[in-house]
Protein backbone atom coordinates (compact mmCIF):
# COMPACT_ATOMS: atom_id res chain seq x y z
CA UNK A 1 0.00 0.00 0.00
CA UNK A 2 1.56 3.32 -1.04
CA UNK A 3 1.54 6.59 0.87
CA UNK A 4 -1.21 8.06 -1.30
CA UNK A 5 -3.51 5.13 -0.54
CA UNK A 6 -2.84 5.46 3.19
CA UNK A 7 -3.49 9.19 3.01
CA UNK A 8 -6.78 8.63 1.20
CA UNK A 9 -7.87 5.94 3.69
CA UNK A 10 -7.11 8.30 6.55
CA UNK A 11 -9.27 10.95 4.89
CA UNK A 12 -12.14 8.48 4.71
CA UNK A 13 -11.75 7.68 8.42
CA UNK A 14 -11.79 11.39 9.22
CA UNK A 15 -14.97 11.80 7.18
CA UNK A 16 -16.67 8.93 9.02
CA UNK A 17 -15.71 10.40 12.40
CA UNK A 18 -16.89 13.79 11.14
CA UNK A 19 -20.33 12.34 10.34
CA UNK A 20 -20.63 10.63 13.74
CA UNK A 21 -19.81 13.91 15.47
CA UNK A 22 -22.42 15.68 13.33
CA UNK A 23 -25.11 13.30 14.48
CA UNK A 24 -24.15 13.77 18.12
CA UNK A 25 -24.36 17.56 17.91
CA UNK A 26 -27.71 18.04 16.23
CA UNK A 27 -30.62 19.22 18.32
CA UNK A 28 -33.90 17.31 18.16
CA UNK A 29 -37.07 19.19 17.32
CA UNK A 30 -38.84 17.65 14.33
CA UNK A 31 -42.61 18.27 14.24
CA UNK A 32 -45.34 15.64 14.23
CA UNK A 33 -46.03 14.68 10.63
CA UNK A 34 -49.24 13.28 9.19
CA UNK A 35 -48.91 9.97 7.39
CA UNK A 36 -52.55 9.07 6.64
CA UNK A 37 -56.07 10.51 6.76
CA UNK A 38 -57.12 8.53 9.84
CA UNK A 39 -56.08 11.40 12.13
CA UNK A 40 -59.23 13.33 11.26
CA UNK A 41 -57.54 16.26 9.54
CA UNK A 42 -58.63 15.39 6.02
CA UNK A 43 -56.71 14.69 2.84
CA UNK A 44 -52.92 14.87 2.76
CA UNK A 45 -51.18 17.57 0.73
CA UNK A 46 -49.15 15.85 -2.02
CA UNK A 47 -45.39 16.38 -2.39
CA UNK A 48 -45.19 17.80 1.11
CA UNK A 49 -44.24 16.89 4.63
CA UNK A 50 -47.66 17.38 6.19
CA UNK A 51 -47.36 18.96 9.62
CA UNK A 52 -50.07 17.84 12.01
CA UNK A 53 -52.23 20.63 13.49
CA UNK A 54 -51.67 18.88 16.83
CA UNK A 55 -47.98 19.88 16.71
CA UNK A 56 -47.01 22.35 19.43
CA UNK A 57 -43.99 24.51 18.62
CA UNK A 58 -43.76 27.32 21.13
CA UNK A 59 -40.59 29.08 20.01
CA UNK A 60 -38.68 30.07 16.90
CA UNK A 61 -35.13 28.82 17.47
CA UNK A 62 -31.88 30.22 16.08
CA UNK A 63 -29.44 28.85 18.67
CA UNK A 64 -29.24 25.52 16.80
CA UNK A 65 -29.14 24.77 13.10
CA UNK A 66 -31.93 22.15 13.32
CA UNK A 67 -30.93 19.65 10.66
CA UNK A 68 -32.19 16.08 10.50
CA UNK A 69 -30.23 13.10 11.82
CA UNK A 70 -29.81 11.72 8.30
CA UNK A 71 -28.62 15.08 6.99
CA UNK A 72 -25.21 14.39 8.52
CA UNK A 73 -24.61 11.67 5.92
CA UNK A 74 -25.50 14.04 3.08
CA UNK A 75 -23.13 16.66 4.47
CA UNK A 76 -20.41 14.06 4.93
CA UNK A 77 -20.89 12.83 1.37
CA UNK A 78 -20.44 16.32 -0.01
CA UNK A 79 -17.31 16.90 2.09
CA UNK A 80 -15.95 13.47 1.18
CA UNK A 81 -16.46 13.89 -2.54
CA UNK A 82 -14.87 17.33 -2.48
CA UNK A 83 -11.92 15.87 -0.55
CA UNK A 84 -11.62 13.04 -3.06
CA UNK A 85 -11.11 15.51 -5.88
CA UNK A 86 -7.74 16.44 -4.39
CA UNK A 87 -6.34 12.87 -4.34
CA UNK A 88 -2.92 12.85 -5.99
CA UNK A 89 -1.52 9.61 -7.42
CA UNK A 90 -0.55 7.99 -10.71
CA UNK A 91 -4.23 7.71 -11.66
CA UNK A 92 -5.06 11.25 -10.64
CA UNK A 93 -7.02 12.25 -13.74
CA UNK A 94 -9.13 9.08 -13.73
CA UNK A 95 -9.85 9.41 -10.00
CA UNK A 96 -10.77 13.04 -10.53
CA UNK A 97 -13.16 12.10 -13.32
CA UNK A 98 -14.79 9.41 -11.15
CA UNK A 99 -15.22 11.80 -8.24
CA UNK A 100 -16.60 14.62 -10.35
CA UNK A 101 -19.04 12.24 -12.00
CA UNK A 102 -20.14 10.89 -8.60
CA UNK A 103 -20.58 14.42 -7.29
CA UNK A 104 -22.69 15.36 -10.32
CA UNK A 105 -24.88 12.30 -9.76
CA UNK A 106 -25.31 13.21 -6.09
CA UNK A 107 -26.36 16.74 -7.05
CA UNK A 108 -29.07 15.29 -9.28
CA UNK A 109 -30.21 12.60 -6.84
CA UNK A 110 -30.52 15.02 -3.95
CA UNK A 111 -31.91 17.77 -6.16
CA UNK A 112 -29.29 20.29 -5.13
CA UNK A 113 -28.73 21.77 -8.55
CA UNK A 114 -30.71 24.94 -7.81
CA UNK A 115 -33.63 24.09 -10.08
CA UNK A 116 -36.03 22.63 -7.51
CA UNK A 117 -36.48 21.99 -3.83
CA UNK A 118 -33.89 19.43 -2.70
CA UNK A 119 -36.31 18.15 -0.03
CA UNK A 120 -40.11 18.28 0.28
CA UNK A 121 -41.32 21.46 2.02
CA UNK A 122 -43.36 21.40 5.22
CA UNK A 123 -47.04 22.13 4.63
CA UNK A 124 -50.37 22.77 6.32
CA UNK A 125 -53.82 23.78 5.08
CA UNK A 126 -56.13 26.37 6.60
CA UNK A 127 -59.86 26.97 6.31
CA UNK A 128 -59.39 30.61 5.37
CA UNK A 129 -59.11 32.70 2.18
CA UNK A 130 -55.62 33.35 0.84
CA UNK A 131 -55.79 37.06 1.74
CA UNK A 132 -56.29 36.29 5.43
CA UNK A 133 -53.46 33.77 5.45
CA UNK A 134 -51.18 36.25 3.65
CA UNK A 135 -51.90 38.88 6.32
CA UNK A 136 -50.88 36.41 9.04
CA UNK A 137 -47.62 35.56 7.23
CA UNK A 138 -46.78 39.23 6.75
CA UNK A 139 -46.81 39.63 10.53
CA UNK A 140 -44.49 36.65 10.98
CA UNK A 141 -41.82 37.55 8.41
CA UNK A 142 -40.01 40.22 10.52
CA UNK A 143 -39.70 37.78 13.45
CA UNK A 144 -37.50 35.46 11.38
CA UNK A 145 -34.62 38.00 11.48
CA UNK A 146 -33.68 37.12 7.90
CA UNK A 147 -33.90 39.98 5.38
CA UNK A 148 -37.40 39.93 3.91
CA UNK A 149 -37.73 39.79 0.13
CA UNK A 150 -40.93 41.47 -1.01
CA UNK A 151 -42.73 41.94 -4.30
CA UNK A 152 -44.17 38.49 -5.00
CA UNK A 153 -47.04 38.42 -2.53
CA UNK A 154 -49.58 38.83 -5.30
CA UNK A 155 -48.45 35.42 -6.55
CA UNK A 156 -48.65 33.84 -3.11
CA UNK A 157 -44.87 33.82 -2.72
CA UNK A 158 -42.97 35.10 0.31
CA UNK A 159 -39.25 34.80 0.88
CA UNK A 160 -36.18 35.86 2.80
CA UNK A 161 -32.53 36.21 2.03
CA UNK A 162 -29.85 34.13 3.75
CA UNK A 163 -28.91 34.97 7.33
CA UNK A 164 -25.65 33.78 8.90
CA UNK A 165 -25.64 32.22 12.36
CA UNK A 166 -23.17 30.24 14.42
CA UNK A 167 -22.38 28.51 17.70
CA UNK A 168 -19.25 26.88 19.08
CA UNK A 169 -19.34 23.83 16.79
CA UNK A 170 -20.67 25.16 13.49
CA UNK A 171 -21.66 28.04 11.26
CA UNK A 172 -24.82 27.95 9.20
CA UNK A 173 -26.95 30.09 6.95
CA UNK A 174 -30.59 29.67 6.09
CA UNK A 175 -33.40 31.28 4.17
CA UNK A 176 -37.15 30.68 3.86
CA UNK A 177 -39.41 30.30 0.85
CA UNK A 178 -43.13 30.34 1.67
CA UNK A 179 -45.80 29.68 -0.92
CA UNK A 180 -49.59 30.00 -0.69
CA UNK A 181 -52.06 28.15 -2.87
CA UNK A 182 -55.82 28.68 -2.64
CA UNK A 183 -57.59 25.35 -3.25
CA UNK A 184 -61.10 26.74 -2.75
CA UNK A 185 -62.50 30.16 -1.89
CA UNK A 186 -62.11 29.34 1.79
CA UNK A 187 -59.15 26.95 1.94
CA UNK A 188 -55.46 27.78 1.53
CA UNK A 189 -52.41 25.52 1.50
CA UNK A 190 -49.14 26.94 2.84
CA UNK A 191 -45.75 25.33 2.20
CA UNK A 192 -42.55 26.40 3.93
CA UNK A 193 -39.10 25.45 2.66
CA UNK A 194 -36.02 26.34 4.69
CA UNK A 195 -32.82 26.21 2.69
CA UNK A 196 -30.02 25.28 5.09
CA UNK A 197 -26.24 25.29 4.57
CA UNK A 198 -23.81 24.23 7.32
CA UNK A 199 -20.05 24.69 7.73
CA UNK A 200 -18.04 22.93 10.42
CA UNK A 201 -14.52 23.97 11.24
CA UNK A 202 -12.76 25.09 8.09
CA UNK A 203 -15.02 23.11 5.75
CA UNK A 204 -16.98 24.88 3.02
CA UNK A 205 -20.74 25.19 3.46
CA UNK A 206 -22.60 21.96 2.63
CA UNK A 207 -26.26 21.45 1.84
CA UNK A 208 -28.19 20.13 4.85
CA UNK A 209 -31.76 18.95 5.41
CA UNK A 210 -33.81 20.98 7.88
CA UNK A 211 -35.69 19.02 10.55
CA UNK A 212 -38.80 21.21 10.22
CA UNK A 213 -38.82 22.79 13.68
CA UNK A 214 -38.89 26.40 12.53
CA UNK A 215 -41.05 25.60 9.52
CA UNK A 216 -43.62 24.05 11.87
CA UNK A 217 -43.38 27.12 14.12
CA UNK A 218 -44.26 29.32 11.13
CA UNK A 219 -47.19 27.09 10.17
CA UNK A 220 -48.63 26.95 13.69
CA UNK A 221 -48.04 30.70 14.12
CA UNK A 222 -50.10 31.33 10.98
CA UNK A 223 -53.00 29.40 12.52
CA UNK A 224 -52.70 31.33 15.78
CA UNK A 225 -52.54 34.65 13.94
CA UNK A 226 -55.90 34.07 12.28
CA UNK A 227 -57.84 33.36 15.49
Image (tube, helix red, strand yellow):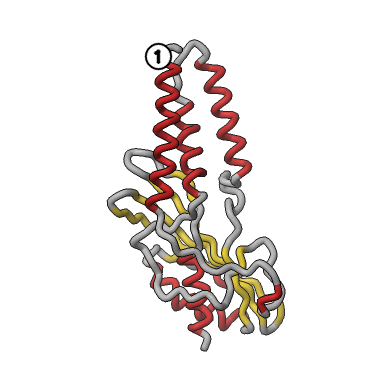
Residue 47 point in image, percent of width and height: 67, 61
Residue located beneath label 1 in the image: 3
Query: Residue 126 at what x, y percent from top left?
Result: 61, 80
Instruction: Looking at the picture, tell me which residue is in the foreground, 181 or 211.
Output: 211
Please rate how many residues cluster around mark 1, counting C-alpha atoms within 10 Å: few if below 14, some from 14 to 19, many from 20.
few
Q: How many marks?
A: 1
Q: Nearer the viewer, residue 1 or 93?
A: 1
Residue shown at the point (39%, 63%) measured from the top left? 146
Q: Secondary structure at mark 1?
A: helix
- Could you say which is closer to the camera, residue 102 or residue 155? 102
Q: Is residue 51 left or right of residue 203?
A: right
The N terminus: image quadrant = top left
| 144 relative position to 94: left or right | left
**Residue 195, relative to residue 9: is it above or below?**
below
**Relative image position of residue 123 (x, y in whole percent):** 59, 68
The answer to which of 194 and 155 lies nearer the viewer is 194
Amino acid sequence: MNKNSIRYDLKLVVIIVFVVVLEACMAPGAPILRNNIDDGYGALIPNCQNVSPSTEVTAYETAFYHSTWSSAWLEGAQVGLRTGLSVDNEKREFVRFEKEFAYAIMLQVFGIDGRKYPFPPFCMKYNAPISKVADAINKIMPILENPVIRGKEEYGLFGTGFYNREHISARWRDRYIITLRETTSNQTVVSVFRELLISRGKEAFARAESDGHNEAWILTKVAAGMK
